Amino acid sequence: MKKWQAALSAATLSAALGGTLLSLTLSSEVSMRATLSQILIFVALAGFVASVALRPAGDRAAAVSRERSAVGEAEKHACDFSSVAANDQALQSLSELRDYLADPEKYARYGARMPRGVLLYGPPGTGKTLLARALAGEAGVPFFALAGSDFVEKYVGVGASRVRELFKKARKAGKCVIFIDEIDALGKRRDDMASDERDQTLNALLSEMSGFHTGDGVIVVAATNRIETLDPALLRPGRFDRQIEVPLPGKAERLSILRLHGANKPLSEDADLEALAEQTVGFSGASLENLMNEAALLAAASGEAAITGDDLNRAYLKLVAGADRPSAADERERRIIAIHEAGHALVSRCLTPENRLARVSILPAGHGAAGYNLTVPKERVMVGRDHLERQICVLLAGRAAEQAVFGEENLTAGASSDIARATEIAAGMVSELGMAGEPAVSLAALNRALGGVTGAAEQARALLSELYGRTLVLVESEIDALSALADALLESEALEGSAAEAILEAALSSERPESA
């Protein structure tokens, strides 16, 4: 005991977090209590594990299954197709299933077989779960909702028994919708590394989907963000034979979603939802709902009579960049941050004029940023090599501006995130897209097929070096515009996009280097 007390009497914890050294000196009494608590917890866990391990395998599986016996209980439907905005193509496809659930005999007379499974795939937050709930609500049938992870367990046979239990309850309920969210958790492509438990669970799902009668009114709807990872046996006709993409909404669809979520909120006359839809490129339906809710919270906190356009703008900035905070930087650091952000804005204005500069700030915001540049990209369907190269140049512009003004020996760590993102884009251009010297070769596909393919790192490095050189030449040629915007940022700390663009336009030279 004396040895323990001597070891614990001066326990000190030091950790470097973001350049900050955090030191905690614990007293011997607190340390002893913590150590004894850990010992007791370890002994209790060891006893539990030993008791479970001594059970027969069948008893262990049954015990785990009993813990999740409530899995698959039907839910009451609380929404229908009127609760869904946008996704017109998906709604049209699901309306056929609604008609089938309402009158399956109609389709039987024509000898038509409705899809046994419907797979909704697309980015997170696009409304896949909402569509499944709306289908059940529109048809007025029970809704069984589970996640793919609910079927994944350590013990072999548990997941398969849950699948059989779910379909048994569904058949007992009659016409119904079974919804499996994140189905890739149990339906990933099988390979030599797959576990017996996952294989048995997937086989049980395949068997149930092939085995239940088409006239019993049971429709399986599943959702995934990664359709490419699913096992081919799931996607063949007779299983999930109808696959519906649920993509990110376009401008018109975003407007309809904003209007849907703004219908129950008091909006002032200056709350321009059309302008908000235009600047929320890349937002999912869930993100738009969250934005409207944030605006409502801001208006309520301010005690306003209605949600104003300023509330919507503040909510947008808060979600995209984070809330501004007072800066603790000294004058030299503020100058570096201003030069860095001015560099991004300058190169974005010169190389991607189709994008709209929304805001430039040297105030700390979310994600650990000391400042930020917020640019609204133009909506596009196809992305070309030139666009990707210009995007990399914009990302590298902050580092280039620091080097142009302060010299290479005074570079800071402020560009670390930008450099990482630029490197990821360059790596994708080289390894996946064939955009770096070998236009018909995907090095990643070669590596998956053959293994041991080399040279991608060298090609990506050469591409990044070339683009950084182009960016540095552009920044140095427009040093007056860079300094003018940096000075304005030091004075105001944050500038709206229109004000920043006006400063740049007044200072930009009429001729720019061809390398830009």
Image (cartoon, grey):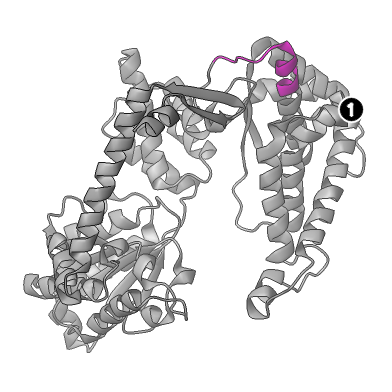
Amino acid on which the number 1 mark rests in the picture: Ser
Give the quarter of the image for residue 303. Answer: top left
Q: Residue at x 60, y 57 (%)?
A: 381
Give the quarter of the image for residue 194. Answer: bottom left
253 is within the stretch colored magenta: no
Q: Is residue 243 left or right of residue 174?
A: right
Q: Nearer the viewer, residue 378 or 109?
A: 378
Can you name the residue that lies furthest to the front here?
2
Q: Is residue 198 left or right of residue 112?
A: right
Can you name the residue that lies furthest to the left here?
172
Give the quarter of the image for residue 34. Answer: top left
For numbered disc 1, what is the local secondary structure?
Answer: loop
Q: Residue at x 77, y 69 (%)?
A: 454
Residue at the spot of label 1:
509
Vertical arrangement, residue 15 with respect to residue 71, above or below: above
335 is within the stretch colored magenta: yes
The crowding category of the residue bearing disc 1, from other C-alpha atoms within 10 Å (few below 14, some 14 to 19, many at least 20), is few
Quarter of the image with the N terminus in it? top left
Q: Nearer the viewer, residue 309 or 363?
A: 363
Please report the bounds of the magenta region as a residue range.
Answer: 326-338
Q: Residue at x 33, y 17 (%)?
A: 301
Q: x, y percentage for residue 494?
A: 62, 18
